[in-house]
Image: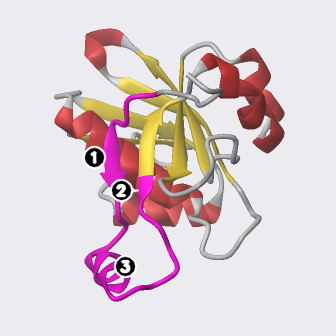
C-alpha cells in the first residue's frame, strides 16, 4: 500500500455554487472530502482539540482532496448515534492554518448532507459559540428550548 491511507470518501463538499464555479475557473481552493477518520489519523484530530483524545463515537474529517495523505484535516467532528438513530455532534474543530480553511459551520453543512443521504431523522449540536449558533440557524437548526445551548435539525 506504500504508506498511503485508504479510506472511502463519504461526500464531496464543494461549499456553495460560487465555490464550485470558482474551482472550474482555476481558483486555488480544492474540493473537500468528508470521510470517517481512520484510526491511524486520529492523532491529527487531537492536534486540533484535546477532547478528541477520549473520543467515543465516530470521528469525521473534512480534508482537501488534493492534499497529501499525511496532511492535517481542515476540520474534524465527533458524532454519536442516539435513540431512534438521531445523531449528536458533540465536538467540532476546524484548522485555523492555511488560506481559505473552512469554518466549523462548513463542516456541519457537510455532515448535514452526509446524514441526510443516510436517512438520519435528526441532527443535534450543542454549542454556546455565537458564530456557530448563527451558522446553525442559517442551516435550518432551531433551539430545542429557549435559553438552552442545544440545536436540532430535522432531516
| Left or right for 103, reference 112 | right
State how far apart marks 1 and 3 are (Cα): 20 Å
- Residue for badge 1: 113
| Label of residue 13 in the image | 2
Q: In front: mark 2 or mark 1?
A: 2
Instruction: Examine the rendered structure and indicate whether residue 135 appears above or below residue 94.
Output: below
Q: Are marks 1 and 3 in contact (CB under 8 Å)?
A: no
Mark 3 vs mark 2: which is more N-terminal?
Answer: 2
State how far apart marks 2 and 1 are (Cα): 9 Å
Q: Is 18 covered by the magenta stretch?
A: yes
Mark 2 vs mark 1: which is more N-terminal?
Answer: 2
The residue located at (61%, 41%) in the rendering is 69
* Residue 143 seen in the figure: no
Q: Residue 39: where, in percent of width, then height?
A: 63, 17
- Residue for badge 3: 23
The residue located at (28%, 34%) in the rendering is 115
Given residues 40 and 60, the one toward you in this image is 40
Q: Quadrant of residue 48?
A: top right
Could you classify mark 1 by the number of other residues whose Cα lies within 10 Å: few (under 14), some (14-19), or many (20 or more)? Answer: some
Q: Secondary structure at mark 1?
A: helix
State how far apart marks 3 and 2 are (Cα): 12 Å
Q: Which residues are magenta?
A: 7-32
| Label of residue 137 in the image | none
The residue located at (44%, 35%) in the rendering is 35
| Outermost bottom residue | 25
Which quarter of the rendering shows the C terminus?
top left
Mark 1 vs mark 3: which is more N-terminal?
Answer: 3
| Left or right for 9, reference 79 | left
Amino acid at each position: 500500500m506504500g504508506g498511503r491511507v485508504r479510506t472511502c470518501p463519504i461526500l464531496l463538499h464543494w461549499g456553495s455554487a460560487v465555490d464550485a464555479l470558482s474551482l472550474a475557473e482555476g481558483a486555488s481552493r480544492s474540493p473537500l472530502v468528508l470521510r470517517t477518520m481512520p484510526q491511524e489519523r486520529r492523532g491529527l484530530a487531537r492536534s486540533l482539540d484535546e477532547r478528541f483524545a477520549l473520543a467515543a463515537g465516530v470521528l469525521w474529517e473534512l480534508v482537501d482532496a488534493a492534499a497529501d495523505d499525511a496532511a492535517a484535516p481542515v476540520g474534524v467532528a465527533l458524532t454519536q448515534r442516539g435513540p431512534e438513530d438521531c445523531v449528536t455532534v458533540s465536538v467540532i474543530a476546524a484548522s485555523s492554518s492555511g488560506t481559505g480553511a473552512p469554518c466549523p459551520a462548513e463542516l456541519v453543512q457537510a455532515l448535514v448532507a452526509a446524514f441526510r443521504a443516510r436517512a438520519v431523522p435528526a441532527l443535534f449540536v450543542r454549542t454556546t459559540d455565537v458564530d456557530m449558533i448563527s451558522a446553525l440557524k442559517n442551516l435550518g437548526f432551531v433551539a430545542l428550548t429557549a435559553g438552552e445551548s442545544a440545536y436540532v435539525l430535522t432531516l
